[in-house]
Amino acid sequence: MNGEKNQDSKIFMYSRYDGATVPQVQHYHNLFEIYFLEKGSCNYFIDNKSYEVKTGDVVLIPGGMIHKTAYSEKEYTRMLINCSGRFIPPTVAPVLPRMLPLYRNPAITDQIYRMFKNIEKEYTAPDSFSSDALVCCTHMLFFLLARNINECEQVNARNIHIDRIVRYIQENYSQPLKLSEIAKIFSLRPEHVSRTFKKETGFGFSEYINLTRMQQAEKLLLQKNNPTVSEVAFRCGFNDSNYFSLRFKELYGVPPKQYQKLKKI
């Protein structure tokens, strides 16, 4: 297992998308995500808030946060990095919280773009030096962002109603949650909540509830008291442990019991 852990510490994935069809990406994972919008605009839902992202913006997402993009334009270009902690410089860690989640600094957009292109070159045409070069290039990207943090524009989250609904879901995920009842709690029409929730977060209402429950289930499975799959399912709001196991495998690639064993080795 030591070999697997060492391999995990070197995880690095890069992709660039340029087209009109939304690519399939994971909306919940344990890797750090660095997103650069080269062209276009979108709503980016991160943890429990929605942000308007513009051309040139960088989005930084720590592992373990639910997130999703909802593009407001048919054509857009984005660059995406998913990496383990090895690619984050230790000296940047103290200022990293100030850079999260949306980094907007038009003065250095061109420099950010060039650094992403250097990373793309190392990733898509690797040689014997590329493994170490990717670490260096990613470190330089973080250094650029950190050094210019004081010139960043202030960006606020959007739609306070959706923020409140998301927070309510996160605090009550173990209970039965119905769109009509939640809409009533916040004095809103169900149709308005459904439409606005999808627009602001990119998730369908039920889709987000299930993903939140899965996020909590993962944490429970890794507790030292080794809860059973049925216990975890019911504590996270699932009435059917078989359905829970099926959905968990779809998201994590393995059944919950196997995931529990693998992560505790």
Image: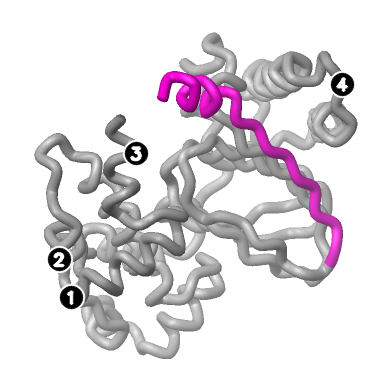
Q: Counting other residues with Cα less than 10 Å from the Cα at mark 3, is it few (<14), some (14-19), or many (20 or more)?
A: few
Cβ–Cβ under 8 Å for marks 3 and 4: no
Which residue position is annotated with label 4?
127
Cβ–Cβ under 8 Å for marks 1 and 4: no
Q: Counting other residues with Cα less than 10 Å from the Cα at mark 4, is it few (<14), some (14-19), or many (20 or more)?
A: few
Question: Residue at the location (73% across, 39% down)?
Answer: 14
Extent of the magenta region: 1-19
Q: In which quadrant of the rendered view does residue 107 lie?
A: top right
Q: Is residue 187 left or right of residue 161?
A: left
Choose the circle earlier in sequence order: 2 or 3: 2
Which residue position is annotated with label 1?
239
Question: Where's residue 72, x and y in %?
Answer: 71, 69
Cβ–Cβ under 8 Å for marks 2 and 1: yes
Question: Where's residue 211, x and y in %?
Answer: 38, 62
The residues tagged by marks 2 and 4 sit, at their Cα atoms, a distance apart of: 50 Å
Disc 4 marks a residue whose amino acid type is: Asp
Which residue position is annotated with label 3?
262
Callout 4 secondary element: loop
Give the quarter of the figure containing the N terminus.
top left
Q: In which quadrant of the rendered view does residue 128 lie?
A: top right
Q: Nearer the viewer, mark 2 or mark 4?
A: 4
The residues tagged by marks 3 and 4 sit, at their Cα atoms, a distance apart of: 33 Å
Cβ–Cβ under 8 Å for marks 3 and 1: no
